[in-house]
Amino acid sequence: MQPVGKIEKIGLWMSKYFALIIILCSFIAFSAPQLFTWIAPHITLFLGVIMFGMGLTMRAVDFSVVAKKPVPVVIGVIAQFLIMPLVAYAIAVLLQLPPELAVGLILVGACPGGTASNVMVYLAKGDLPVSVAMTSISTLLAPLLTPAILLLLAGQWLPVNAGAMFQSIIQVIIIPIALGLLARRFFPKAVESSVKTLPIISIAAILAIVLAVVGVNQANIAQTGLLVFLAVMLHNSFGLFLGHVTAKLCGLDEAKRRAISIEVGMQNSGLGASLAAAHFSPLAALPSAIFSVWHNVSGPALVSIWSRKKNGSEQEAEAKQAG
C-alpha cells in the first residue's frame, strides 16, 4: 500500500503545480529544441495513452446524469461546439492570423473538452457530474463534429480532408477509450490498483506533446509567439466567459454555470496538436500547444476565485438551515 500512497502523492503534487511545470518545460524546449523534436512523430501515441486512461476511468454512471437531467449537458455540449469554434474564427479574422495559425486556432476550438476540466470543476465547486458527462459526450461526438466544423470554418484558409480527420480521431480517441473501457470491464482489480498512476501518466504525456510542438516550432514562436499567445488567451477567456453567460441565460444554477464555463473554455488541446501535426503542419499545432500551457494557468486562476465563493447548492442549504 505504501508505494501506491507515494505514487498518489506525486500525482497530486504534479496536478497542483502542473501550470508551473508546463511553463518551465516550455521554456526549456524553446531554449534547447533539439532535445525534444524527436518526440514529434510520436504525438499520436502519447494522445492515445491519455485517451486509454480516460477509458479506464469512464463508467456507466457518468452517462446516467444525461438520462436523468439531460438539459444542462445538452446546453453545455451545444455551447462547446458553437462558442469555441466561432470565437476562434472571429479572432483569426480580426487578428489576420496566417493561414496555418488560423486553422490551428479553429481546430483547437472544434475539439471536445479536456479531461483536466473535470478536476477544475471539482475544485471550483461546480457540478462535477455535468462536467464529466460533457467531457465524455463531446469526446464521443468529436469524430463527426470536429472535422465538420473545421471543414465549414477553416476551409477558406487551407484544404481540409474531413474524411481523413474522421479516421484519425477514431484511431487516437475512440479506439483507445474503447480499449480502456474493455480493460475496466474484464480486469477490474488490475485497473483499480493502477488507476492512481493515471494523473502522472496523463501529465507526462501532455508534457511530451507540448515539448514536441514547442521544440519543432522554436523559430515560429520567436517570430509569431506574441500574436499566437494573444489569440489563445482571447480564445480561452471568451470561452470561459461565454460558457458561463450561456448557462446563466438558460436559467441554470451557479454550480452548473461553473461546470459549463470551464468545460467550454478548456479544450482537449492534445487532440488539436495531434490532428494539426498529422493533417496540416507543425505551425498549425502551435495554438494547441500554447492552449495547453495557457488553460492550465487560467483554469486554476478561476478556481482560486470560485472556490472562495458559494455555489447555488451551498446557498440553498444555508437558506434551509436558516429557515
Image (cartoon, rainbow, N blue to C red):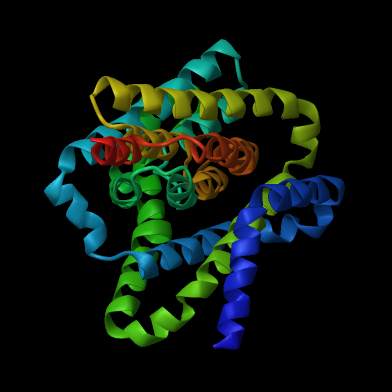
Tell me, yes or no, if residue 70 can be seen here: yes
Residue furthest to the front in view is 323
Give the quarter of the figure containing the C terminus. top left
**Image point (56%, 46%), residue name:** 273
Residue 161: x and y, percent?
40, 39
Q: Is residue 256 left or right of residue 25?
A: left
Residue 61, picture quadrant: bottom left
- Is 42 above or below relative to 169? below
Residue furthest to the top in view is 94
Tell me, yes or no, if residue 155 can be seen here: no
- Is 16 above or below relative to 179? above
**Image point (28%, 84%), residue name:** 186
**Image point (40%, 46%), residue name:** 165
- Is 204 above or below relative to 77? below
**Image point (43%, 59%), residue name:** 172
Q: Is residue 218 left or right of residue 170?
A: right
Marks counted in the figure total 0
Give the quarter of the figure containing the N terminus. bottom right
Q: Is residue 26 left or right of residue 299?
A: right
Q: Nearer the viewer, residue 5 or 276?
A: 5
Residue furthest to the right in view is 31
Q: Nearer the viewer, residue 202 or 2?
A: 2
Residue 304: x and y, percent?
57, 39
Q: Nearer the viewer, residue 289 or 219?
A: 289
Residue 221: x and y, percent?
75, 34
Residue 249: x and y, percent?
27, 20
